[in-house]
């Protein structure tokens, strides 16, 4: 490694080199990747938190408008995740990480200015929310970077830890928002933005000093195009749509759903904002921690089995939310304590399950394509490079596609409130999706793996069975 932080000879599968010191280099880079991802996720979630500081009678924005702000940030993140994953391969992990953090200073300052000028139309808020979406795009780059640093036997843990600890940025900024509301009141959102300006500066300087670029960590647009013809790319993306998409979508929407229901229970806006904030950060935090364990569990028993169990359980919990919401619809204007407990418990369970599924799906990606690489006729070195590059490309694509789930959840909730005044219709849509995703997981991965293990004829795509 030279003075420019460039590592020219990196082979994570070399066990001797790994134990001789490469593991420490990988760990150092992983910790700074996580720190940057953590703060970037916080900026991405800035407007869902700021929505708690924006009463309708002051800013003029309805609940549907606030859901649209969250959907805009998520949509931009989804669109930018593929370019961001290519940024790692083009400019280097260290260089791109520093750049992706520095650019987030602009929307953070912009948010301070907008909140200081209530009465403006919705569109400048939408533009600023779109720019915060760059923080969500940072995730694809961080996961691609981690994938290059770690050996296959450790990817489930490394990717799960990266994603889980990075995802904790969402509940952390929600916790900061809660503390600001509790200490300074619901009219001082500037404290939140000011803190994150300082944190952005700190992690950018740390990444510039401690991170490295890997010379071999390359793939290009043609490689990305090639993975789009693979059926597994699209199926894995669909599964991630249901797990990560649910986690980020509910993270953005949960506070608003609670605030609407607390207002329906007769609370004032400051009371509803405080009580919504008290619960809003717990679910995303539980999901983030569950993601770390989901990756480790998938390392032991297989990502496809964990994913199937998660999706089936998410369908059951969503059916429970349908029942709770339907009961609430039949008693308009009378949101009871039992109903609120039902909403909170149901969402907490969904957060934990989605977190487990996030880790298990990401374990599946390198496993599926490592198994595929064995039938390509490459030398061992070429096979490893193909597996690494393909997994990196698929991780970037799956991360982008999965974020669209957050867009779908916020738009579904928005449309449900606009059309019926309740969220029941949206829960029905979520329930049908989870059932379909569980069926795909069983048919394509779990059942086929069991057939391969029992000696049944294998398809060409699975001539080398692997625990996926």
Image (tube, rainbow, N blue to C red):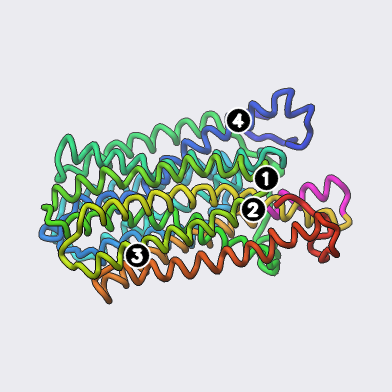
In the rendered view, does 343 fall on the left or right side of 78?
left
**Foreground tag (3 vs 1):** 3
In the rendered view, does 400 fall on the left or right side of 46?
right
Tag 3–tag 4 contact (CB < 8 Å) = no
The percent coordinates of residue 177 (x first, y second) are: 26, 42
Which badge, 3 or 4, comes first in the chain's sequence?
Answer: 4
Tag 3–tag 1 contact (CB < 8 Å) = no
Disc 2 from disc 1: Cα separation: 7 Å
In the rendered view, does 6 fall on the left or right side of 125?
right
**Foreground tag (3 vs 2):** 3
**Foreground tag (4 vs 1):** 1
Which badge, 3 or 2, comes first in the chain's sequence?
Answer: 2
Which badge, 4 or 1, comes first in the chain's sequence?
Answer: 4
In this view of the protein, which residue sits in the foreground, 267 or 60?
267
Let me know if residue 101 appears in the view.
no
Circle 3 is placed at which residue position?
323
Tag 2–tag 1 contact (CB < 8 Å) = yes
Circle 1 is placed at which residue position?
301
Circle 4 is placed at which residue position?
27
Mark 4 lies on a secondary structure that is helix
- The residue segment tinted magenta is 378-391
Mark 2 lies on a secondary structure that is helix
**Residue name at image x 51 percent, y 61 percent:** 242
Disc 4 from disc 2: Cα separation: 28 Å
């Amino acid at each position: 490694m030279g003075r420019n932080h460039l590592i020219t000879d990196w082979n994570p599968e070399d066990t001797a080199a790994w134990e001789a010191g490469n593991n420490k280099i990988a760990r150092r880079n992983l910790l700074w990747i996580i720190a940057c991802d953590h703060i970037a996720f916080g900026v991405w979630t800035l407007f869902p938190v700021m929505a708690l500081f924006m009463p309708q009678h002051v800013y003029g924005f309805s609940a549907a408008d606030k859901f649209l702000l969250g959907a805009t940030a998520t949509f931009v993140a989804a669109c930018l995740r593929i370019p961001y994953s290519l940024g790692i391969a083009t400019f280097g992990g260290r260089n791109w990480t520093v750049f992706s953090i520095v650019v987030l200073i602009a929307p953070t300052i912009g948010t301070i200015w907008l909140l200081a000028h209530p009465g403006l139309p919705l569109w400048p808020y939408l533009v600023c929310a779109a720019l915060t979406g760059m923080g969500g795009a940072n995730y694809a780059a961080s996961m691609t970077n981690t994938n290059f640093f770690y050996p296959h036997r450790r990817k489930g843990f490394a990717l799960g830890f990266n994603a889980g600890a990075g995802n904790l940025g969402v509940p952390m900024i929600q916790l900061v928002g809660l503390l600001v509301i509790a200490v300074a009141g619901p009219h001082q959102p500037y404290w939140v933005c000011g803190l994150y300006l300082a944190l952005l500066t700190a992690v950018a300087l740390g990444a510039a000093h401690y991170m490295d670029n890997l010379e071999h960590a390359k793939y290009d647009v043609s490689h990305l195009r090639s993975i789009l013809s693979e059926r597994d790319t699209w199926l894995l993306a669909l599964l991630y749509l249901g797990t990560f998409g649910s986690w980020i979508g509910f993270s953005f929407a949960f506070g608003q759903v609670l605030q609407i229901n607390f207002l329906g229970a007769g609370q004032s806006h400051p009371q509803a904002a405080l009580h919504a904030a008290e619960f809003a950060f717990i679910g995303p935090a539980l999901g983030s921690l569950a993601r770390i364990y989901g990756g480790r569990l998938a390392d032991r028993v297989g990502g496809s089995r964990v994913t199937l169990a998660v999706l089936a359980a998410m369908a059951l919990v969503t059916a429970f939310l349908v029942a709770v919401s339907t009961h609430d619809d039949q008693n308009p204007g009378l949101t009871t304590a039992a109903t609120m407990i039902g909403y909170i418990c149901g969402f907490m369970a969904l957060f934990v399950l989605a977190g487990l599924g996030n880790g298990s799906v990401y374990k599946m990606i390198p496993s599926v394509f490592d198994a595929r690489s064995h039938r390509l006729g490459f030398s061992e070195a070429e096979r490893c490079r193909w597996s690494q590059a393909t997994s990196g490309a698929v991780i970037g694509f799956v991360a982008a596609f999965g974020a669209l789930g957050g867009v779908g959840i916020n738009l579904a909730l928005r449309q449900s409130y606009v059309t019926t005044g309740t969220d029941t219709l949206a829960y029905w849509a979520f329930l049908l999706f989870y059932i379909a995703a569980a069926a795909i997981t069983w048919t394509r991965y779990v059942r086929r793996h069991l057939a391969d293990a029992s000696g049944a004829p294998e398809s060409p795509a699975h001539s080398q069975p692997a625990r996926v």
